[in-house]
Amino acid sequence: QRKLYQEHESELVVDVSTRMWPLLGTIIHGILERTDSRAIKEVRLEKEINGVIISGKFDIFYYYNHRLEDWKVTSKYQVKQLKFEYEAQINILRYLIATVLGIETISAGIVAILRDANFKDQFDKAAGFIHIYQTVDEGNFVSSVATIEVPLWTLAETRNYIESRIEEHKH
């Protein structure tokens, strides 16, 4: 599939309307780069483990409170519960920050921009949606942003997970 794409890339036509959500993600990451001067933003880190280079790029790390955040544009249904791949991603990024930069992460979270949140969702709290709600003078406003705290693994647990993934990909 990759080879076909490379051979015919100049002939392909992309319907722009199918690229709206990735575009929104790019815009949000562009805005993040211009925010809080007390944060490290959009940095790619690399480390060799068992002869393999692993790399990761984190969205934002607030060094004044040692918090790591990953921002995602996604559906409200994707944040009903923390996905394991999000948890693993954050913990691998935390591992890289600790071992490459020498900085400890105390807390971490996913900040999700919910592309399909609506007013009705405020009544769905019991269904497990993790929304941030704000009260406005004349009524309720449902935010389209959700924050999900990510449990932090020990650095040893994360290293073991990375090594197991490396082994899995060797076979």
Image (cartoon, grey):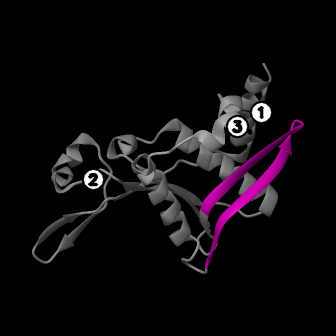
| Helix, strand or loop under label 1 | helix
Callouts 2 and 3 close, C-beta under 8 Å: no
Please, what is the three-letter code of the amino acid marked with disc 2? Ala
What is the number of the mark on residue 23? none
Query: Which region shows up in magenta?
Result: 38-59
Q: Nearer the viewer, mark 2 or mark 3?
A: 3
Callout 3 crowding tier (Cα within 10 Å): few <14, some 14–19, many ≥20: few
Q: Dot 3 corresponds to which residue?
A: 6
| Helix, strand or loop under label 2 | loop
Q: Quadrant of residue 62?
A: bottom right
Callouts 2 and 1 close, C-beta under 8 Å: no
Please, what is the three-letter code of the amino acid marked with disc 1? Glu
Q: Quadrant of residue 44?
A: bottom right
Please, what is the three-letter code of the amino acid marked with disc 3? Gln
Q: Dot 2 corresponds to which residue?
A: 117
Callout 1 crowding tier (Cα within 10 Å): few <14, some 14–19, many ≥20: some
Q: Is residue 4 left or right of residue 50?
A: left
| Helix, strand or loop under label 3 | helix
Instruction: Tell me how many marks there are.
Output: 3
**3D distance between C-alphas at marks 3 and 1:** 32 Å
Determine the main secondary structure of the stretch shown in magenta: strand
Taking the spot 79% from the left edge, 62% from the top edge, the residue there is 102
